[in-house]
Amino acid sequence: MSRSWLRRLLAALGDRVGAVFKRRDEFDLTDGDIGRPLLYLSLPIVITNLLHTAYNLVDTIWLGRYSTEALAAISFAFPVVFFLISLGLGVAIAGSILVAQNVGSGDEGRAEFAASQTVTYATIASLFLGAFGYVAVGDILALLGATGSVLTGATAYLQVVSLGMVFMFAFFVFMSLMRGYGDTITPMVVMFVTVVVNVVLDPFLIFGWGPFPELGVVGAAYATVFSRALASVIGMAIMLSGVRGVRIHPGRMVPDPAFLRKLVRIGVPASVEGTGNAVAVNLMLVIVGTFPTVVVAAYGVGVRLFAVIFLPAIAVGRGVETMAGQNIGAGKEDRAGSTTRFAGKAMFAILAAVGAVVWIVAGDIVRVFSDNPDVVEIGRLFLRYVAPTFGFTGVFHAYKGGFRGAGRTLTAAVISIAVLGVIRLPVAWVASRPFGHEGIWLAFAVSNVAGAAIGYGWYRRGRWRDADLTEDPNARGPRGVSTDADGEPTVDD
């Protein structure tokens, strides 16, 4: 009875949302026009990512009103959360790629098997990472330069998040698997519900409104974990019921060693990319942390704003990942390439225009997050340094999405790590000596342009086309995955 009720409720919700956005079965990602299906695929991702970022933005706004120390604490805490999640996020990315390519090849049975196994291994990974995070975050933050009340607040925040790491992971996996299938609408709807919960809880738990105690930074952590837990429960219920997108089956969730090998070979480069990016972000904090607290606070505001501004590029990159994956699974490599090129051009034009607007109103934007005049002025300069390069960031994400969809997760990892670790960090370290904190802002601009150039240049090599990861439906079991001359994963015959 309860399952039938859930199925009817979710189906009705999907139909209502479908009145605004097209459902997957109303367009074909492997045939016809490119712009329209990419838009329908990416727009819900933009909204979902906006809602996802709302967790961090709401925390930043409320904690900025609470105290400058709390704002600095959250500036240290967010990159560490990113680091912990990135260690295991390759599992979700690999699952999304495998689902997309198997759906493109017409084998939804193997797509569902891949989704079920991905949930199992992501859950195991999250439990290990949560335990590691709870024990290690204090030392990590101290290594990054957090001290005094900033260290205390950031540690308390991260320990609560670490205890809820399984919920943080579960929703990421839900979004990734549904996206691989081509359903980006359902995760958007689920995210909306849970963000509302977070927005309502935050001020009550941070400031101690009503019957709640004043918890400060820790209150923001509790609100986020509770909201993510709600999203995870809803997401898993949707996939178990199969009313929208890909379906998971409890009988197929028993750990399969052969699938684990494939997941590791595809997912490890994606995890290396995410972890490398997180390490680079945290090392940037070491440089930023040598400056006064107002600089740290302005840096925190700036990177949170970039997270919002670059959402369209990230979303389109994910849309390209799905479209490229399904087209390569269907044997249409040329269409996968055309999708990537189209996305790069569109994102450059859109984000360049956004950059022009941000450059003009930079100071007003920072004032939303802080009324400290020093923070506002430093943050204004940060935005003005980076805004003219926004369009290049759009190109960078579009081409990375094409590489991932083709299964070239190692290529995407090398490019990302090169941009952040080989270009941005050294430039920031060197330039901050003579130019102070403005040297750090310059490093962001230089690395954004370099990332676009490297991504496009690598794309022109054309070696990304031949990484088909689909299974042979006539095989007795899952085939293994080996690597080619470039070290990229390929399927064994």
Image (cartoon, grey):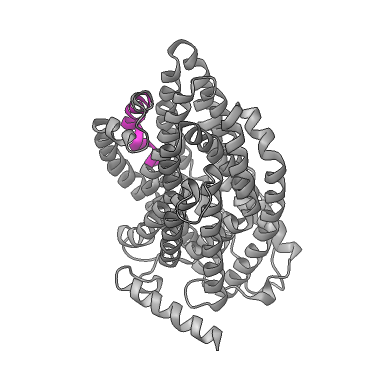
Residue at left 25%, top 39%?
353
Residue at left 64%, top 44%?
487
Left or right: 464 with respect to 473? left
Q: Nearer the viewer, residue 294 or 424?
A: 294
Q: Which residues are magenta?
A: 378-395
Q: Is residue 251 magenta-colored? A: no
Spot occupied by residue 465 in the image (x, y as percentages of width and height): 51, 51
Can residue 96 be seen? no
The quarter of the picture where residue 485 lies is top right
**Main secondary structure found in the magenta portion:** helix
Residue at left 46%, top 31%?
68
Q: Is residue 61 above or below residue 421?
A: below
Q: Is residue 22 above or below residue 55?
A: below
Q: How many marks?
A: 0
Furthest residue toward bottom: 1
Spot occupied by residue 3 in the image (x, y as percentages of width and height): 55, 84
Q: Which quadrant would the N terminus be assigned to in this image?
A: bottom right
Spot occupied by residue 238 in the image (x, y as percentages of width and height): 52, 73
Q: Which quadrant would the C terminus be assigned to in this image?
A: bottom right
Furthest residue toward top: 434
Spot occupied by residue 50 in the image (x, y as percentages of width and height): 39, 52
Q: Nearer the viewer, residue 188 or 192?
A: 192
